[in-house]
């Protein structure tokens, strides 16, 4: 028995190494005693379940070739008439006089120099939905969790609250950095960053990275633009003084979406080699939100195939019926593994909270964009989230016994924030159940505020992934749009998060690194500044990216895709 257990642990570690995660709370190797004990505990729990597991191969829908929007002639950079442009801008931006593009010096800040920096970045020729109030307040955000509020609409008797101006400027700078580091084929790649950037402050040695995560990075970068309310036909211009260029935001988004759809396989997955669920979930989210924003049929067809793959990849419940969570690889991988006996049974339902939460967010984006998602898939995911969580607001990565324990892997010299798992559980519960009375939510919120975002002197406290999910969880639970709206938890978290992220962003004027987050965190070893910049832009869009989920309990989207 001892030799058999040792062999199982060895194989488990080997598989974890071969399927190392990329930019998230996943682990490269479970080598600590805590992880080993967790596995033993998992086995003991599993023995009480009915291990007669169904072996169901994932469905591989066959769809007609996607007819993408036709290629367009070179873009006419002449801005539309002033009256049309002013319809795209906020009242603050509308105060800036119109200047013809051919008279602009794009290397200089644009607009009234007496305005604050973030305001001065916006002019009619650089119009953006990111301005005073933000897209969600103005009723033009992506709103994948319910209909956007109309302009000036109050929530619960309260007027809409504008995001902090400093975070708005940070979002704009981050999108500029992403725009100038997009590959020619529309994708984003950390391994090929040198192909589009020769600046030594941005360039990263390609040998340090792999292209295995390019699809996920492309999905993540697209979400940063989609989260601000832009889709493939958005006419707004993004002026980049660093490179003296202006980009039509819709072209950036369209090129990224084309890069994803061109890489999508017949089974709906996107990863270049073997399917990797972080990649698949991020790509699925991007396509679903692109369809929700634009209503374009090509994005719908691709999103439907992506959703079918996510559903087919879900693990079966160890209880013998229904579904469970997700792991790095799809469910069908279990049938081809070289594990034996009870190891195969374990692999058949082994799931982790990190991958599962991304999959949940992808499926909810699909459902609320009007796409079909099996309810039993969502129910199974919620069951797994409940099982892996404890009543004190903590949650485990693989099992409830791991709650409060550190996860070992690459970059162990960084601080590990156990409350990250609490944030993941809170988000999954919020968007799956919409139950504001769930006692775990407040217990989890208490865990988060005990570990607020802070930048230590050695910067080893930095954890962008934790800060992203913590911001989303607390904004939903306790933010200005929440039914509770006590601000007891969101208030201190919001201040700490904004201070940390704005302070860490590169701001040197004229540098190609301006707008990026070059300070790494524990999980950026496979995504580098593409990951950190895209994820932090998403974090700073938390003020308007999603409607409050507790106001849409058991409801589908109330607007047709592409309609606002």
Image: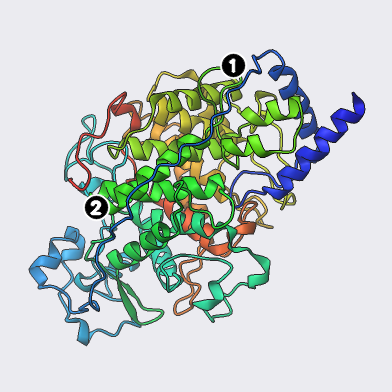
Q: Quadrant of the C terminus?
A: top left
Q: Is residue 92 left or right of residue 447?
A: left
Q: Which residue is identified by label 2?
A: 296
x 51%, y 25%: residue: 323
Q: Residue 92: horizontal and vertical position, in percent? A: 20, 61
Q: Residues within 10 Å of mark 2 (few under 14, many from 20)?
A: some
Please name whichever residue, 149 or 385, is drawn nearer the observer in this view of the structure. Answer: 385
Q: Which mark is residue 490?
A: none
List the residue tagged with mark 1.
319
Task: Give above or below for 464 relative to 252.
Answer: above
- Is 43 in front, or is 171? 43
User: Mark 1: which secondary structure?
Assistant: loop
C-beta proximity under 8 Å, tags 2 and 1: no
Q: Nearer the viewer, residue 346 or 532?
A: 346
Q: Earlier in the sequence, mark 2 or mark 1?
A: 2
User: Where is residue 145 shown, x and y percent of the image?
Assistant: 32, 37
The residue lying at 67 percent from left, 49 percent from top is 20
Q: Examine the rendered structure and indicate whether residue 43 appears above or below residue 231.
A: above
| Residue 372 drawn at (x, y percent) | 33, 34
Residue in the picture at 58% in, 17% down = 320
How many marks can you see? 2
Q: Residues within 10 Å of mark 1 (few under 14, many from 20)?
A: some
Q: Identify the coloring.
A: rainbow
Instruction: Point out the image quarter for the N terminus.
Output: top right
Q: Nearer the viewer, residue 481 or 9?
A: 9
- Which residue is at a point 43% across and 63% down the rendered structure image? 174
Tell me, yes or no, if residue 103 can be seen here: yes
Up-down: is 318 above or below 179? above
From the top left corner, tell me how far across and down residue 111 is, in percent. Answer: 25, 74
Q: CA distance from mark 2 to mark 1?
A: 40 Å
Q: Secondary structure at mark 2?
A: loop
Residue 491 in view here? no
């Amino acid at each position: 028995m001892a030799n058999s257990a040792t062999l199982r642990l060895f194989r488990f570690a080997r598989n974890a190494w071969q399927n190392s995660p990329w930019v998230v709370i996943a682990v490269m190797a479970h080598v600590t005693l805590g992880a080993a004990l967790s596995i033993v505990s998992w086995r003991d729990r599993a023995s009480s379940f009915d291990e007669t597991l169904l072996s169901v191969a994932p469905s591989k829908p066959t769809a007609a070739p996607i007819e993408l929007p036709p290629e367009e002639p070179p873009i006419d950079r002449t801005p539309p008439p002033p009256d049309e442009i002013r319809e795209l801008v906020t009242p603050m931006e509308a105060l800036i006089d119109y200047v013809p593009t051919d008279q602009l010096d794009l290397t200089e800040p644009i607009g009234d120099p007496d305005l604050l920096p973030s305001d001065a970045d916006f002019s009619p020729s650089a119009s953006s939905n990111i301005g005073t109030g933000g897209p969600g307040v103005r009723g033009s955000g992506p709103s994948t969790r319910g209909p956007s509020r109309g302009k000036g609409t109050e929530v619960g008797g309260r007027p809409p609250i504008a995001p902090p101006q400093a975070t708005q400027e940070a979002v704009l700078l981050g999108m500029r950095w992403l725009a100038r580091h997009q590959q020619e084929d529309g994708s984003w790649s950390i391994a090929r960053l040198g192909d589009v950037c020769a600046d030594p402050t941005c360039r990263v040695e390609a040998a340090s990275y792999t292209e295995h995560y390019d699809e996920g990075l492309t999905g993540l970068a697209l979400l940063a633009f989609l989260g601000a309310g832009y889709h493939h036909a958005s006419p707004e211009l993004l002026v980049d003084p660093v490179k003296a260029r202006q980009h039509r935001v819709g072209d950036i988004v369209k090129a990224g979406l084309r890069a994803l759809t061109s890489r999508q396989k017949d089974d709906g997955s996107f990863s270049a080699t073997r399917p990797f669920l972080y990649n698949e979930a991020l790509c699925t989210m991007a396509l679903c939100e692109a369809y929700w924003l634009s209503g374009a049929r090509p994005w719908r067809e691709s999103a439907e195939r992506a959703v079918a793959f996510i559903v087919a990849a879900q693990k079966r419940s160890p209880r013998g019926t229904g579904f469970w969570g997700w792991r790095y690889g799809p469910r069908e991988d279990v049938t081809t593994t070289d594990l034996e006996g009870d190891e195969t049974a374990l692999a058949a339902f082994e799931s982790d909270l990190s991958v599962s939460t991304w999959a949940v967010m992808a499926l909810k984006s699909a459902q609320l964009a009007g796409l079909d998602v099996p309810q039993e898939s969502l129910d199974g995911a919620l069951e797994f989230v409940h099982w892996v969580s404890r009543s004190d607001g903590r949650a485990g990565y693989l099992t409830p016994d791991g709650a409060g324990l550190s996860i070992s892997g690459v970059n162990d010299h960084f601080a590990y924030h156990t409350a990250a798992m609490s944030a993941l559980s809170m988000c999954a519960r919020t968007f799956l159940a919409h139950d504001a009375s769930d006692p775990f939510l407040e217990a989890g919120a208490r865990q988060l505020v005990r570990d607020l975002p802070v930048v230590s002197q050695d910067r080893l406290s930095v954890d962008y992934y934790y800060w992203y999910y913590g911001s989303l969880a607390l904004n939903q639970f306790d933010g200005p749009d929440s039914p509770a709206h006590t601000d007891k938890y969101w208030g201190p978290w919001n201040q700490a998060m904004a201070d940390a992220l704005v302070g860490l962003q590169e701001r040197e004027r004229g540098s190609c690194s301006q707008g990026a987050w070059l300070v790494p965190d524990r999980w950026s070893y496979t995504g580098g500044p593409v990951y950190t910049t895209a994820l932090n832009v998403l974090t700073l869009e938390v003020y308007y990216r999603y409607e409050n989920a507790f106001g849409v309990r058991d409801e589908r989207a109330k607007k047709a895709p592409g309609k606002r």
